[in-house]
Amino acid sequence: MTDTPKHHDVEEATLLVEAGRRAEWTSGIVNVPVYRASTCVFNSYEELQERTAAPSARHLFYARKGTPTQWALEDAITDISDGEGTMLYPSGVAALAGAMLACVDAGDHILIPDSVFDPTRSIADNFLTRFDISASYYDPRIGANIDALMQPNTKLVMTESPGSVTFEIQDIPAIAAVAHKHGAKVITDNTWATPIYFKPLDHGADISVEAVTKYIGGHSDIMMGAAVANKATFKRLQRAAFAMGQLVSPDDASLALRGIRTLAMRLKHHQENALELARWLEGHDLVHAVLQPALESHPDHALFKRDFKGSSGLFSIVMKGGRYEDTAAMIDDMRLFKIGYSWGGYESLILPSDPAPYRTVTPWTSTGPVLRIHAGLEDIKDLILDMDAGLERYRKQIA
Ligand SMILES: *Cc1c(COP(=O)(O)O)cnc(C)c1O
């Protein structure tokens, strides 16, 4: 964690207001306008030559390379992530795929934590294998012992902290030190913490991936991903993204910029609600465990305290007994906790999520079903009432 951010001389809350709002782009209004564009027209042969020579500079060339609307979002994400530059993608998964493809060549090997977001597994196992790129999985709590798994052709170590559904915290500085010693790059999927609560590039990662779809968008109305790279990695990332024609619509970029302005405030409230709900659930007799790294009871709490500035609103609970089918009695009639994929919007969600089928090196065994919970921005009293009633329905179901 740096006390003196590289990109700015103001506090983070101020930066969230200022980021990306270059005067030449806003030209007298507060927000960067939505530039809907394909063709950009040049004033002369000379200007055509100039811009064609440097198509990725921050001037209009052809809208596939962006307009001020996307550039403002890229700059804002770069600034709050202490990065060198950001590329935008039409989804978080596209950002993961774009970042991974930027780091590997045919014949390379990738290390991936066993707690990884399932589609990341899919990119490696069902797509990169076609280019003779292999992947193997490691215990997310491995830390510096990852050294023993590094192969001569290991060129990329994926990290995600906390892990999807199961919430293991990874020692990213220790893993990055080993990876770099072997000449491998490190990507961190930072969707859970967002750059507000964790800045992977300050802890040794080379690329930080954000599903903008989640907290940065914040209102469950856009799909988008971002990959932010450090100085040594940005050119590679940019070349790969341009080669594959990745871009996002200016309308979506504008919504994501709007999300950034309130990101810290929203997260603070998500955190408060999540912790109160998690503590309440921890005391419930039907709940075997609460998987939330900000709780003192979490096995990785010390690591969390060392590296993270706060917690977002997503965590899981492990039920004491019952089967996945039994959770229907609990979730079908909830008033506020909606059943749905994704998270990071203003609303609360609940989702039965069995980690067992995805684990390949660290088997998952538990006393009962796992439910993933997103604490939204509702009043905590209403959320607890809704959860309490749901748990009583579950009690009847499994009795
Ligand atoms: C949702 C999610 C993504 C992917 O984002 P999409 O925009 O849905 O593609 C990536 N990583 C994590 C950890 C996620 O939860």
Image (spheres, helix red, strand yellow):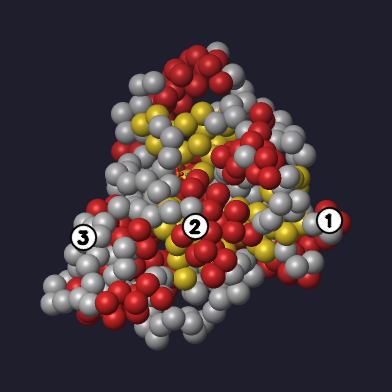
- Camera-side residue of 123 and 21: 123
Where does the image place residue 66, in percent across and percent down from the top left?
A: 33, 63
- What is the quadrant of residue 259 in the picture? bottom left
**Label 3 residue SS:** loop
What amino acid does circle 2 point to? Ala
Residue 174 vertical placement versus 217 (above, below): below
* Label 2 vs label 1, nearer the camera: 2
Where does the image place residue 251, in percent across and percent down from the top left?
A: 25, 53
Residue of label 2: 243
Q: CA distance from mark 3 to mark 2?
A: 24 Å
Q: Earlier in the sequence, mark 3 or mark 1?
A: 3
Residue 13 vertical placement versus 136 (above, below): below
- Camera-side residue of 385 and 99: 99
Q: Residue at x 50, y 72 (%)?
A: 83
Q: Residue at x 75, y 68 (%)?
A: 183
Q: Specify the farthest residue to the front.
A: 45
What amino acid does circle 3 point to? Val
Residue of label 3: 34
Q: Residue at x 59, y 59 (%)?
A: 102
* Label 3 crowd bin: few (<14), some (14–19), many (20+), radius 10 Å: some
* Label 2 crowd bin: few (<14), some (14–19), many (20+), radius 10 Å: few
Q: CA distance from mark 3 to mark 1?
A: 47 Å
- Residue 185 is at least partly visible in this image: yes
Residue of label 1: 151
Q: CA distance from mark 2 to mark 1?
A: 29 Å
* Label 3 vs label 2, nearer the camera: 2
Q: Earlier in the sequence, mark 3 or mark 2?
A: 3
**Label 1 residue SS:** loop
Residue 335 vertical placement versus 44 (above, below): above
Q: Are circles 2 and 1 on residues that touch, CB within 8 Å?
A: no
